[in-house]
Every structure is written in C-alpha cells, then in structure tokens.
Image: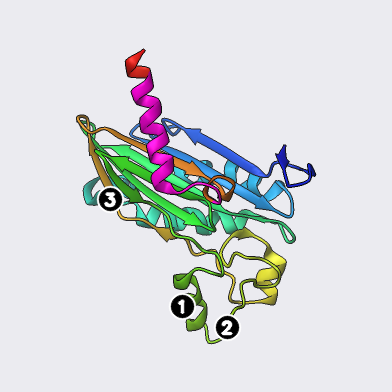
C-alpha cells in the first residue's frame, strides 16, 4: 500500500514485469513498468499484453532479422504500443507504460532500447555514463506542451492539467481520448544503447513514486554504493 501524508492508504497501481528470454525468441527479453490511474486494471492489462505482442511481432523472422541487422527495434516497439492500445478496452482507467527491450547478437554484444508513455522513467548507467532512456509526458513538460501546441489547440499559460490529468500520453482512458484529441498513445522511443560483455551497466525503471522524490543521478549513486558495499563484504 502507498501512503499519503496523514496516513491515508491508497491502493498500489504500479505493475512491474519482465520476461527473459521472450517465449520462442531466445535472443530477446524485456522489462517493464505500468502505473495506473483511476484503478489498477489498465496497468494489469498492459503488463500482460505488451510482452505477448512484442513476442508475437518478433516471431516473424523477417521482422526479427530486421531488428538484428539494423540494431534498431523502433518499428517493433511502436507497433507493440499501437496494438496494445487497440486491444485495451478501458474507458475510464489508464496507465503509463515503460518498456525496455534487450537483445543480443549471439556474441558478446547486447543492445537496449526503450519506449514509454507518461512519467514512469528509465535511466541507465553504462561505464559511469548516465543515459536517460525515457521522455516525460506530463503537461508541465516543455516538449509535451510543444507537441500539444502542434495539434492546433495549445494549452493556456499556467495550465498543467488536461481533463483533470497531469499526463497527455497514456494507454487506455478511451473516454478522455474521445473527448480531447490532444491525448496520445504515441510512445517516445529512445536511441539504441550498445553494451558489450566488458561493460559495467545497469538500468533503473520506476514510476513517479520514486522520481518525484529522488533524482536519476542520486538513484544511480545509491545503486553504485550498494554494489561497492557488497564488494567490501
């Protein structure tokens, strides 16, 4: 249970998941988190659909070989989010979605790419370099306000909510999307990160429950401190 100031209990609406390897696609695996609003059912649905749909897309040998040859899974991730949104039948609930896809070329090389909607974020540390893998889709985000402005219906100065939500991109919430075309399910897709066997790398994925109280840099430092502590034992 999550606690608000004053001790009021709120139901947990975060759903984390992973599959490594993906069924029938041994070179690929994924990790994800969904943060629900209006309930946890949309997050639960998305966390089941996304792995199934990604595995189904990659079961096509041509699509799989395209990812491996180009070292880029943008089309797969974009299609997976589109199909997931299409399959979800949640009119009054929605969720963020952050999915980290990892694959190997069969040798010493790994590749990592992320897609996200909302404000559940992923950061990576690769050999001491902090890499932001997601984009914030809150109404207060400068880049998100620019996207909304391009729809022809810009937000007013100081306006930080759209139909009561502080997010402009999500899965589900079909009713709100029917009412306001400024909502979107188009994911942000990161650049591909290359990792070899000699690299010291890890990723942190979390909902706004973490990122509202700790910076990405601090989160990385805490993980590194924990690793250092284990080495000293």
**Vertical side of 49 occupied by 116: above or below:** below
Magenta segment includes 227: yes
Q: How is the image coloured?
A: rainbow
**In percent of the image, x 71 and y 56: which residue is there?**
93
- Of tags 3 and 1, the one toward the viewer is 1
Residue matched to label 2: 157
Describe residue 14's horizontal placement relative to residue 54 as left or right: right
Q: Nearer the viewer, residue 68 or 18?
A: 18
**In percent of the image, x 57 and y 50: which residue is there?**
208
**In percent of the image, x 31 and y 47: which residue is there?**
130
Could you tell me which quadrant the C terminus lies in? top left
Q: Position of residue 187 (x, y in %)?
A: 47, 60
Q: Which image quarter: residue 156?
A: bottom right
Q: Position of residue 175 (x, y in %)?
A: 72, 68
Instruction: Tell me which label, 2 or 3, sits earlier in the chain.
Output: 3
Residue matched to label 1: 146
Answer whether residue 60 is visible to the viewer in this image.
no
Cα distance, mark 2 to mark 3?
Answer: 44 Å
């Amino acid at each position: 249970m999550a606690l608000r100031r004053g001790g009021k209990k709120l139901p947990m609406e975060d759903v984390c998941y992973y599959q490594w390897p993906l069924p029938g696609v041994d070179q690929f695996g994924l990790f994800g988190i969904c943060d629900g609003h209006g309930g946890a059912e949309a997050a639960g649905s998305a966390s089941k659909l996304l792995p199934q749909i990604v595995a189904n897309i990659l079961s096509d040998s041509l699509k799989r070989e395209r990812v491996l040859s180009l070292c880029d899974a943008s089309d797969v991730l974009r299609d997976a989010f589109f199909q997931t949104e299409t399959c979800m039948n949640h009119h009054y609930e929605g969720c963020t979605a952050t999915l980290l896809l990892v694959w190997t070329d069969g040798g010493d090389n790994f590749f990592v790419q992320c897609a996200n909607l909302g404000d559940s974020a992923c950061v990576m540390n690769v050999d001491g370099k902090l890499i932001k893998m997601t984009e914030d889709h809150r109404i207060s985000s400068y880049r998100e306000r620019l996207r909304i402005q391009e729809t022809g219906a810009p937000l007013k100065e100081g306006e930080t909510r759209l139909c009561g939500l502080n997010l402009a991109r999500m899965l589900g919430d079909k009713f709100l999307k029917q009412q306001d075309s400024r909502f979107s399910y188009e994911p942000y897709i990161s650049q591909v990160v290359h990792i070899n066997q000699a690299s010291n790398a890890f990723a942190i994925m979390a909902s706004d429950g973490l990122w509202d109280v700790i910076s990405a840099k601090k989160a990385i430092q805490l993980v590194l401190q924990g690793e250092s502590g284990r080495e000293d034992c």
